[in-house]
Image (cartoon, rainbow, N blue to C red):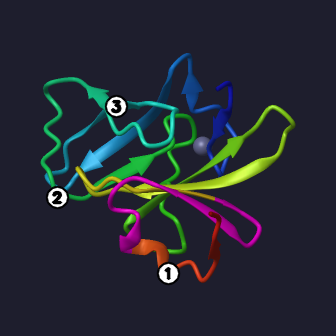
Amino acid sequence: MNFDFLCPKCHGHLRVGDHIIFSVKTENKESGLILMHPEFGNYKYENHSSLRLEEGKHIDFYCPICHAKLTSDRHENLVKIIMCDENGKEFEILFSKIAGQKCTYKIIGESVEVFGKDSDDYIDFFNLSAMT
Ligand SMILES: [Zn+2]
């Protein structure tokens, strides 16, 4: 899967190799970098051991290029980035900013594709029809 992931503000590339890179800040005001996987439904991530990400806590995600806060206007608990497929088609990608909460939404037009065991938690906020 060679999709690109872009910052919705500056359109800078957040994907480098097999990771999507974010700058994050925890509720305890600790900052660091987090490397996430580009496959949907893979919630493994890597970070330096000095950055403590506790389950259930909010993590604020920022673009590492322009430092914009990547919060969706659909729900304050969701991070928004852009995915660009091989044809240049852009999708809105949302995922939870709560550590340990596994949900991802891929939105184009009025349709949403959902991933992750916690994906029911926010689906009602979108007012979109789920793709089956
Ligand atoms: Zn940016």
Q: Name the residue under label 3.
A: 33
Identify the magenta region: 107-121
- Residue 16 included in the magenta stretch of the image: no
The mark that comes first in sequence, 3 or 2, is: 3
Residue that sits furthest to the right in the current view = 87
The mark that comes first in sequence, 2 or 1, is: 2
Q: What element carries label 2?
A: loop
Image side of residue 128 versus residue 98, left or right: right
Q: Position of residue 62 (x, y in %)?
A: 45, 46
Q: Residue at horizontal 50%, vertical 54%?
A: 70
Q: Identify the mark at residue 104; answer none if there is no mark.
A: none
- Which amino acid type is marked by label 3? Leu
Q: Identify the mark at residue 56; answer none if there is no mark.
A: 2
Q: Mark 1 points at which residue?
A: 125
Front tag of 3 and 2: 2
- Which amino acid type is marked by label 2? Gly
Q: Residue at horizontal 51%, vertical 19%?
A: 18
Label 3, label 2: how far apart the Cα atoms are: 19 Å
Is residue 24 visible in the rendered image? The answer is yes
- Which amino acid type is marked by label 1? Phe
Q: Residue at horizontal 34%, vertical 43%?
A: 24
Judge by depth and name the residue closer to the eye, 129 or 18.
Answer: 129
- Report whether the residue tagged 3 is closer than 8 Å to ligand 1: no
Picture quarter with ligand 1: top right
Q: What element carries label 1?
A: loop
Q: Where is residue 74 in the image (x, y as percent from the top left)?
A: 53, 74
Label 1, label 3: how far apart the Cα atoms are: 29 Å
Is 90 placed above or below 105 here? above
Q: Residue at horizontal 18%, vertical 33%?
A: 51
Judge by depth and name the residue closer to the eye, 24 or 90.
Answer: 90
The mark that comes first in sequence, 1 or 3, is: 3
Is 83 placed above or below 36 here? below
